[in-house]
């Protein structure tokens, strides 16, 4: 894998394979936050699980119901997005 390359394969919104991963910043059943060669990644869904992880090769396999995949430029942007989502969720309750 080229250091600057990344590949995403989404199969029926149930299985997501990603290369070019540097680190798993946080994970849970509804959100997985990754650091990749192109910046932060935010994967949202339900029943999310990390089924395979090889940080040496820079690859991850995520299963569950994938609802959203987004890139963030920095940790600050990820933090701001998480805070705004939490605030919106509190307002809508």
Image: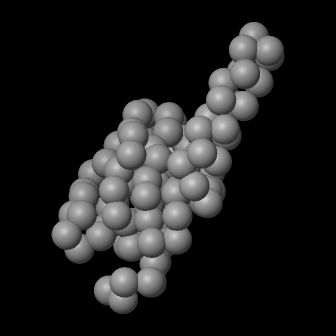
Along the line of sight, which residue is nearer the eye, 87 or 76?
Answer: 76
Decide if residue 27 is on the left or right side of residue 11.
left
Q: Position of residue 15 (x, y in %)?
A: 43, 58
* Residue closest to the eye, 61 or 2: 2
Residue at the location (46% across, 77% down)? 7
Viewer-closest of 16 and 12: 16
Q: Residue furthest top?
A: 93
Quarter residue 74 falls in: bottom right
> Residue reaching furthest bottom?
2
Residue at the spot 75% in from the left edge and 11% down from the top edge = 93
Residue appearing at x 72%, y 14% in the figure: 90
Q: State how the image is colored.
A: one colour
The correct choice, above or below, for 71 with respect to 43 in the image is below
Q: Residue at x 80, y 16 (%)?
A: 92
Quarter of the image where one finds residue 80: top right
| Observer able to see residue 90 | yes
Residue 75 place in picture, x, y as percent: 54, 48
Q: Is residue 4 above or below residue 21?
A: below
Give percent across and percent down for residue 4.
44, 83
Q: Quadrant of the N terminus?
A: bottom left
Count every numbered label the image shows and give the total: 0
Is residue 64 in sight in this rendering?
A: no
Q: Whole-percent x and y of residue 9?
A: 47, 71
Q: Is residue 6 left or right of residue 52?
A: right
């Amino acid at each position: 894998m080229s250091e600057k390359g990344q590949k995403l394969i989404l199969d029926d919104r149930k299985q997501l394979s990603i290369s070019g991963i540097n680190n798993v910043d946080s994970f849970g059943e509804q959100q997985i936050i990754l650091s990749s060669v192109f910046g932060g990644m935010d994967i949202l869904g339900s029943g999310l699980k990390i089924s395979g992880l090889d940080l040496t090769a820079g690859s991850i396999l995520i299963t569950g119901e994938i609802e959203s995949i987004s890139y963030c430029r920095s940790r600050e942007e990820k933090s701001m997005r998480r805070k705004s989502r939490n605030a919106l969720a509190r307002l809508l309750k």
